[in-house]
Image: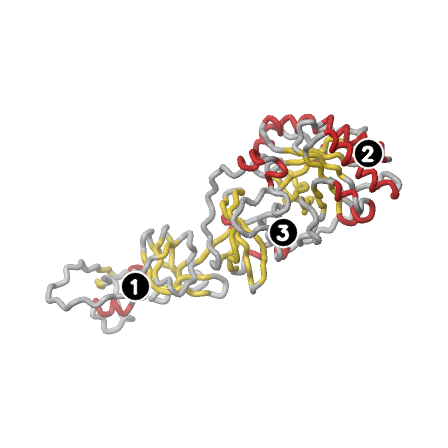
Amino acid sequence: MKLKNKIILVGVTFLAAFSFGQNSKASTVPKPVGDFSEWQGSFSANQVKKLKSQVSFVILRVQYGSNYRDKTYAHNVALMQKYKVPYGVYSFGQFTSVSDAATEAKDLYNRAPKALFYVNDAEQLTTARSVYNQANIQWYKTLNKLTNKHIIFYSYRGFQKSYAPTAYKYYDAYWLAAYQSSVPSPQNYHLWQYTDAHYFSSIAKSTDASTIMRSLKPLSWWIGSTNASKQSTKVYKYGGIKKNWQVMIKSSATHWYNPRTKIPASAKSPTYRVQSTQKITYSKSNEAVLLYRNGKAVGWALAQDISSYYNAKSVKALKFETNDYSYSKPNLTGKKWYHKKGTVLRGNTYFNGRFWVFKTANGVYTSANKSLKSYVSVKAPTKKKTTTKKSTAKATYYTVKRGDTVSAIAARYGTTSAKIKSLSKLSNVNYIYVGQKLRVK
């Protein structure tokens, strides 16, 4: 839909109050809603099959007034029906009188009898100002006699207040056009068209996108409970993030979650705290997380776009879940040492100013990322009775190579320089030679 006086705002604060007044308990948060006309062209079968996984439903333009039919509607709606993409339809209002509004409503119904709902797109003054409000009321009353399906009023706030101050209240729902980053107020609308630049990869185009105000009209209200339940059957891979975890946004992340506005590069550097989580089914995630920084909400992100870190004082040992490195510097740079999967290092979590790392007992650092390490419980040592039985533990030795240091060898074997000094009976850990055998365990 083409709107006048668009206001487009950008930034990461668009979700500072993003809950839309909605239930914060676990729920399935719908995907974006796309609305399309001949401006987006005729879709292919392959495009529609992919589009199905990216939208909650679509809204197709049928007509531009009664006298102009959308050139792509017949083709595109046939594909929506074939691949079972839920859809509603809209008419761009061009009526010139009250009776003409009734005609447009009838034409929309007759041209789209299988639609799940009907929309009156009211954004252009086409009658005398004194008549326009009543004409929109008549549009609703006429269609309401023909069907028991939902009838929706679409407009942007300024136009609605000026020319249809009471007409929108007759409709079953209000679809508000407001291209802005903050949630519009007052929240007397049920569907919010928040952008005209949402990129749908399925059709390789940026176009209008809306989000459902689900606490007022859930997804099932729009497309029926059967269609809504089908969207929650797929298994999604990423989730399991908990409240109060310290996290960062991955550099590969592109969009915030619902509404899907772009994540700026500046948002990928800070560390955030997880304020709350929601169960969802979107993209590859079964969870969305609300990120806080300095006590303020920043936005909802998909679990697949989040890196989480161990940061509790109780974490004293971590196990490598994949081959990885430890480093001489806390920002994970400098000299590095290789560790095989399964290696366990002891130490403490450490905040390096940007994110949490794990500082080992030898003073080297490794990632505390939960996707790379797993927590290992370390029990307090218990006193054992003295026994004269000789230990049968097998000693481990290492042959010194050029460039080795005792601290580096200790890091490699998960021990300490002091321990190697004691086991190897070294007088000075700074004096070792190539070919020397050191006992490390």
Q: Is residue 168 left or right of residue 435?
A: right
Check disc 3 and report its element: helix, strand or loop: loop
Which three-letter amino acid code belongs to the residue tagged 3?
Answer: Phe
Which three-letter amino acid code belongs to the residue tagged 1?
Answer: Ala
The residue to which callout 1 is attached is 410
Mark 3 and mark 1 lie on one chain; the one further toward the N terminus is 3
Residue 205 at least partly seen:
yes
Measured in 3D between alpha carbons, the distance from the residue under mark 3 to the one under mark 1, in whole angstroms, is: 54 Å
Measured in 3D between alpha carbons, the distance from the residue under mark 2 to the one under mark 1, in whole angstroms, is: 83 Å
Up-down relation of residue 27 to residue 226 (above or below): below
Q: Closest to the observer: 109 or 18? A: 109
Residue 252 at least partly seen:
no
Quadrant into which the N terminus falls: top right
Q: Closest to the observer: 68 or 229? A: 229
Tell me the quarter of the picture where residue 109 sits: top right
Q: Closest to the observer: 433 or 323? A: 323
Mark 2 and mark 1 lie on one chain; the one further toward the N terminus is 2
Q: Residue at x 25, y 66 (%)?
A: 381
Using the image, tell me which numbered label, if any, was put on residue 20. 3
- Residue 18's x, y, as percent? 61, 54
- Residue 294's x, y, as percent? 56, 64
Q: Is residue 137 left or right of residue 246?
A: right
Check disc 2 and report its element: helix, strand or loop: helix
Which three-letter amino acid code belongs to the residue tagged 2?
Answer: Ala
Up-down relation of residue 302 to residue 69 (above or below): below
Tell me the quarter of the picture where residue 52 sits: top right
Tell me the quarter of the picture where residue 431 sits: bottom left
The residue to which callout 2 is attached is 101
Mark 1 Cα within 10 Å, few/some/many (few <14, many 20+)? some
Measured in 3D between alpha carbons, the distance from the residue under mark 2 to the one under mark 3, in whole angstroms, is: 33 Å
Mark 3 Cα within 10 Å, few/some/many (few <14, many 20+)? some
